[in-house]
């Protein structure tokens, strides 16, 4: 479990993660296509080829994960700069987290937060199992 | 009827009830997805219907249905929630910024801010106070304490009729038979509505048991 709650970034920051609300995640996923590509680390596949709705919902889900699924305090200098945008605490954290992450790390953030959020009986689903489940749900959503 | 409730985060709420007619309208607005079935051959070459609960298309539809129901319930039940004291609702502004639609502060609180256990408990309390519920009927059964041949009436197996009745139909029938207009019945608190429905069900069971008793006695 502790492995999933920490995400080490190339920039030297370790993100502390916690589970978010399943209903909110599902709300974004139900409108999102190609999450399977995201979970494989291929964010360029989504951002370059996605339709506008997919992109919008991907960014919304990323903002939710980064703002609510990360518990780190935003460094003071970054907070002062971002607060000029007039956003709330969580949006500021989201913007800071997105700013310091690579695409690969964003994909890993998705995988770990999905595993933490959709755990069963106190045990988290492994990212691989979740990726498979989400890919299947999305494929079926397209068919239906 | 009102209930005080404190959430996991320490929010103090006062929960009242909603008009059951609004709940009845929500129930019929959209039905849950039908469970796909498969015919299987069992022992003795008997064909049986097997529900396929893990069918991926059904699971996807179920997720969509539950998301829709959660939002509709939150909007409906928001009017029965009163916030006591102050709650920092700035998180709802953040939710709006990431694209979640917040129809009202109370609906946003119920749908997006509360812990899942709190949300379920609050919905259960408001429904119990508003309409006929299994909990209300169980409480009435215990209170009535009706027995037949030294056994609770509810423990006797009575054949069911081959008709399928909605809960609203049953409630309207009970209201009519017990001398209420429908608006009068809807104005009763949930436990009182449940008590009336429970009384009707017990009376029907007793009538059948008495008829069977007479038939056995005469034969």
Image (tube, coloured by chain):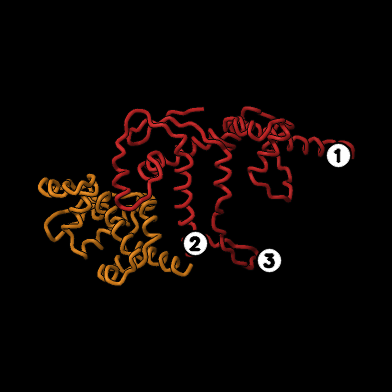
Chain colours: A orange, B red
- Residue appearing at x 81%, y 39% in the figure: B212
Cα distance in 3D space between marks 2 and 1: 48 Å
Given the image, what chain letter belongs to the residue carrying mark 2?
A: B
Q: Is residue B20 above or below residue A58?
A: above
Figure quadrant of residue B89:
top left
- Residue appearing at x 44%, y 68% in the figure: A142
- Residue appearing at x 78%, y 36% in the figure: B207
Q: Position of residue B211 (x, y in %)?
A: 82, 37
Q: Residues within 10 Å of mark 3 (few under 14, many from 20)?
A: few
Mark 2 lies on residue? B54
Q: Between tags 2 and 3, which lies in front? A: 2
Q: Between tags 2 and 1, which lies in front? A: 2
Which mark is drawn over residue B215? 1
Which mark is drawn over residue B46? 3
Pointers 2 and 1 in contact (C-beta within 8 Å): no
Do circles 2 and 3 both sit on a common chain?
Answer: yes
Work out whether residue A41 or residue A52 is closer to the camera in this orientation and state it: A52
Given the image, what chain letter belongs to the residue carrying mark 1?
A: B
Q: Position of residue A84 (x, y in %)?
A: 16, 47
Pointers 3 and 1 in contact (C-beta within 8 Å): no
For marks 2 and 1, the one nearer the N-term is: 2
Q: Position of residue A120 (x, y in %)?
A: 38, 53
Do circles 2 and 1 both sit on a common chain?
Answer: yes
Q: Residue furthest front?
A: A85
Given the image, what chain letter belongs to the residue carrying mark 3?
A: B
The kind of secondary structure element at disc 1 is: helix
Cα distance in 3D space between marks 3 and 1: 36 Å
Work out whether residue B18 or residue A109 is closer to the camera in this orientation and state it: B18
Q: Is residue B59 above or below residue B188?
A: below
Figure quadrant of residue B147:
top right
Q: Position of residue B76 (x, y in %)?
A: 48, 41
């Amino acid at each position: 479990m502790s492995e999933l709650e920490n995400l080490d970034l190339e920039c030297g920051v370790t993100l502390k993660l916690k589970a978010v609300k399943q209903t909110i995640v599902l709300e974004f996923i139900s409108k999102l296509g190609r999450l399977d590509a995201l979970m494989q680390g291929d964010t360029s596949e989504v951002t370059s080829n996605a339709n506008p709705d997919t992109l919008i919902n991907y960014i919304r889900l990323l903002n939710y994960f980064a703002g609510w699924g990360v518990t780190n305090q935003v460094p003071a200098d970054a907070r002062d700069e971002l607060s000029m945008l007039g956003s709330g605490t969580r949006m500021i954290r989201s913007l800071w987290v997105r700013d310091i992450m690579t695409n690969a790390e964003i994909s890993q953030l998705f995988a770990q937060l999905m595993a933490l959020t959709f755990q069963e009986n106190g045990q988290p689903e492994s990212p691989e199992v979740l990726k498979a489940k989400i890919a299947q749900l999305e494929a079926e959503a397209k068919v239906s | 009827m009102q209930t005080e409730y404190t959430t996991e985060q320490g929010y103090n709420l006062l929960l009242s009830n909603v008009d059951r007619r609004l709940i009845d309208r929500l129930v019929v607005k959209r039905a849950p997805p039908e469970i796909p079935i498969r015919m299987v051959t069992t022992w003795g070459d008997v064909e049986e219907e097997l529900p396929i609960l893990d069918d991926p298309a059904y699971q996807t539809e179920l997720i969509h249905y539950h998301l829709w129901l959660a939002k509709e319930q939150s909007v409906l039940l928001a009017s029965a929630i009163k916030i006591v004291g102050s709650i920092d609702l700035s998180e709802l502004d953040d939710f709006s910024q990431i694209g979640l639609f917040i129809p009202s502060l109370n609906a946003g609180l119920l749908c997006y801010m509360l812990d899942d256990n709190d949300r379920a408990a609050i919905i259960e309390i408001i429904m119990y106070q508003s309409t006929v519920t299994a909990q209300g009927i169980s409480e009435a059964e215990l209170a009535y304490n009706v027995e037949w041949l030294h056994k609770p009436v509810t423990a006797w197996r009575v054949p069911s009729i081959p008709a399928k009745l909605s809960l609203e139909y049953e409630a309207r029938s009970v209201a009519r038979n017990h001398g209420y207009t429908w608006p009068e019945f809807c104005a009763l608190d949930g436990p009182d509505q449940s008590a009336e429905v429970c009384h009707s069900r017990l009376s029907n069971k007793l009538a059948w048991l008495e008829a069977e008793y007479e038939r056995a006695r005469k034969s």
